[in-house]
């Protein structure tokens, strides 16, 4: 069953209460609180802010005898709450309970409001008994300020020739923050905390932090592990989302892939998980994001468009990791079928790993499937004002070396059909080909090989594609257009894949919060992207796309700013990208050997443009034909 916790709402944003009660640092204090309540006799529970059900979802009140439940919102009076009829808090004065459990943090004010109603001798307990330490808070005056719980999880592994490397930056500086720190917990596959520590982040804009599994394993003298890393940023400002790039690499140079941040709010559904091709295995890494065990049949898989769900009959402990082989639940599923994940708000956006018949493997992620959308007839009418409107850009890598495949992925429960087209552009922004998918059904298998579309028409060998809405054959849209993009090296057989959703780009008119802005209100018409750089002998590639829903400035004014790990600028290069076009470049070819040497180990590049919004993809390459590719994060 799905957890009854509030995680994220597009109307209200992220909810941090579940993060506060599910933080790894408070688990022991929560157990002590419940044990104290169980020993205190009959308990009167007062739930002024509606937190009680969410609290008991992660911390069941085992052994606690509830005498009565009280609320302050008149509309909640009489409702069933924790198997009791909710009473007005004004009735508390007549309670015979021996103790009161006030289910809130920063409880002093709520307590003052009812102090005259508390019977003499009644002891009072609150959630303040399970606060994280004050030195881990950014805003000490308001405990449930979302900025106090800028947290996330990352898949993390080291052993059997496999390693992981997480890179992020102090992008909070741009919101008025200064020096920050990462508070970290490393969990093994069973959910045991192998290590806890803090890592400083420099105060300068773009100061990088690199967490490498090999170095962490040596630092704490650990054995092999496959689990997850919990990240909590102390000193964040303006932005409570923890973004990062995550590389997976190996002792063998053929092991190389990448993914990125886990989208920190557990969702009901995820979609876009590809079924395996013949000879492949697809492993979904199910990683419990909470301090409560996932009961058997908490997670299930079904083919997209099918109501037949196959459930995992396996318990997954608190913060534990389980490798779910897709074939164990859906043995006949085959690419280009795609799979929907019934997640029940138990885990943040998961990773999946594809193991090919040659032994090569790649890692990627599905996406959050929205449950709160409805078809929007206005989208079909936007072309007069918004041109292309919503569009999803992705690279076409050099066709001589790489094959590119595209699979549109339904990503909301409202999408019964997908009215789509695919448009291919050369680097200068000229359309070279167009493919109309028509009105795809939810359970479609319409993967497109770009070789059949571009057919040698890309003059410089690369370009980009855009998925757009096409209502020629009818259909409806909701703006949550997604696709999966798969790339394979024609010589080595190595592959990578990435997925993302559509936005409206580079138009001054706005619609439903688009063009999206990281700072301030829409439209977002500027670029600040973070490009992590791979350690030698790897080279880093970057594909920057200048998508435009309507004609915008003729060329971009893009600065590639090479920085040392501490954020100090070493060098910069100017890049001019035609509107509607793209540029594919490499670190080793763009910056000189002297500049790269001055930048040093763990350098990074900030991509800055005040004239337009760019969309970027990054990857690593080695001499053996292995490569990685994923979209970049902005801030």
Image: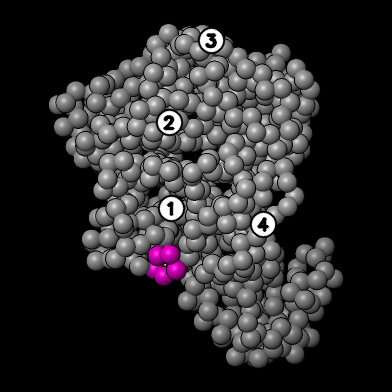
Residue beneath label 4, please? 310
Is 411 in front, or is 547? 411
Q: Which residue sits at x=53%, y=79%? A: 31
Q: Which residue sits at x=44%, y=46%? A: 355
Q: Is residue 632 visible?
A: no
Label located before the other in sequence (3 or 1):
1
Residue beneath label 2, please? 488
Residue beneath label 1, please? 154
Marks 1/2 in contact by CB < 8 Å: the verdict is: no
Residue 507 pos. (x, y %): 59, 19
> Mark 4 and mark 1: span between their CA atoms?
26 Å
Magenta-colored span: 188-193
Query: Mark 3 Cα within 10 Å, few/some/many (few <14, many 20+)?
Result: some
> Mark 2 and mark 4: span between their CA atoms?
31 Å
Residue beneath label 3, please? 432
Compared across the picture, whether 211 is left or right of 332 comes to left
Examine the rendered structure and indicate whether residue 506 appears above or below residue 343.
above
Is 312 in front, or is 57? 312
Label located before the other in sequence (2 or 4):
4
Residue 239 pos. (x, y %): 48, 44
> Mark 4 and mark 3: span between their CA atoms?
43 Å
Name which quarter of the figure residue 440 lies in: top right
Is the C terminus in the top left, top right, bottom left or bottom right quadrant?
Answer: top left
């Amino acid at each position: 069953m799905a957890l009854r916790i509030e995680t994220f709402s597009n109307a209200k944003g992220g909810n941090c209460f579940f993060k506060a009660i599910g933080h790894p640092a408070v688990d022991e204090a929560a157990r002590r609180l419940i044990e104290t309540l169980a020993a205190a006799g009959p308990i009167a529970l007062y739930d002024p802010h509606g937190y009680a059900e969410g609290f008991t979802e992660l911390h069941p009140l085992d052994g606690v005898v509830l005498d009565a439940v009280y609320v302050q919102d008149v509309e909640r009076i009489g409702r069933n709450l924790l198997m009791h009829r909710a009473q007005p808090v004004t009735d508390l004065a007549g309670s015979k309970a021996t103790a009161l459990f006030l289910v809130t943090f920063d409880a002093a004010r709520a307590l003052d409001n009812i102090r005259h109603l508390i019977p003499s001798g009644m002891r009072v307990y609150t959630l303040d008994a399970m606060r994280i330490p004050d030195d881990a808070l950014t805003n000490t005056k308001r405990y449930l300020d979302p900025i106090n719980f800028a947290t996330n999880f990352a898949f993390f592994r080291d052993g059997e020739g496999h390693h992981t490397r997480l890179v992020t930056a102090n992008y909070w500086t741009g919101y008025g923050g200064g020096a920050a720190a990462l508070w970290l917990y490393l969990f093994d596959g069973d959910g045991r905390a192998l290590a806890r520590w803090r890592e400083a982040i420099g105060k300068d804009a773009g100061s990088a932090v690199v967490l490498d599994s090999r170095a962490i394993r040596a630092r704490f003298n650990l054995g092999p592990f496959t689990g997850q890393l919990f990240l909590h940023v102390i000193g964040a400002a303006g932005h409570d989302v923890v973004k990062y790039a995550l590389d997976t690499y190996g002792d063998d140079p053929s092991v190389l892939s990448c993914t990125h941040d886990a989208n920190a709010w557990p969702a009901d559904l995820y979609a876009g998980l590809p079924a395996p091709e013949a000879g492949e295995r697809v492993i979904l890494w199910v990683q419990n994001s909470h301090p409560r065990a996932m009961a058997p049949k908490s997670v299930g898989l079904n083919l997209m468009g099918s109501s037949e769900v196959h459930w995992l009959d396996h318990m997954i402990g608190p913060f534990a990791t389980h490798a779910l082989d897709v074939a164990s639940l859906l043995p006949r599923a085959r690419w280009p079928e795609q799979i929907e994940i019934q997640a029940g708000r138990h885990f943040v956006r998961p990773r999946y790993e594809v193991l090919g018949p040659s032994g090569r493997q790649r890692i990627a992620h599905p996406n959050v499937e929205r449950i709160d959308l409805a078809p929007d007839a206005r989208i079909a009418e936007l072309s007069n004002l918004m041109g292309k409107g919503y569009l999803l850009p992705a690279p076409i890598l050099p066709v001589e070396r790489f094959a590119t495949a595209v699979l549109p992925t339904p990503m909301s429960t409202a999408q019964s059909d997908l009215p789509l087209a695919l448009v291919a552009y050369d680097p200068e922004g000229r359309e070279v080909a167009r493919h109309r998918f028509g009105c795809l059904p939810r359970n479609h298998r319409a993967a497109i090989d770009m070789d059949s579309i571009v057919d040698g028409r890309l003059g410089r060998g690369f370009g980009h594609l855009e998925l757009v809405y096409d209502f020629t054959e009818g259909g409806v849209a909701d703006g949550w257009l997604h696709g999966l993009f798969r790339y394979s090296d024609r010589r080595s057989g190595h592959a990578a894949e990435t997925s993302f959703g559509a936005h409206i780009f580079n138009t001054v008119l706005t619609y439903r919060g688009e063009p999206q802005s990281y700072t301030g209100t829409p439209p977002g018409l500027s670029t600040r992207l973070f490009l992590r750089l791979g350690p030698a002998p790897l080279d880093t590639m970057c594909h920057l796309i200048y998508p435009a829903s309507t004609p915008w400035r003729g060329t971009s004014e893009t600065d590639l700013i090479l920085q040392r790990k501490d954020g100090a600028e070493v060098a910069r290069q100017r890049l001019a990208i035609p509107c509607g076009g793209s540029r594919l470049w490499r670190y080793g070819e763009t910056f000189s050997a002297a500049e790269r040497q001055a930048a040093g180990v763990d350098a990074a590049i900030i991509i800055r443009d005040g004239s337009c919004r760019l969309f970027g993809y990054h990857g690593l390459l080695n001499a053996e034909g292995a490569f990685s590719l994923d979209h970049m994060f902005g801030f």
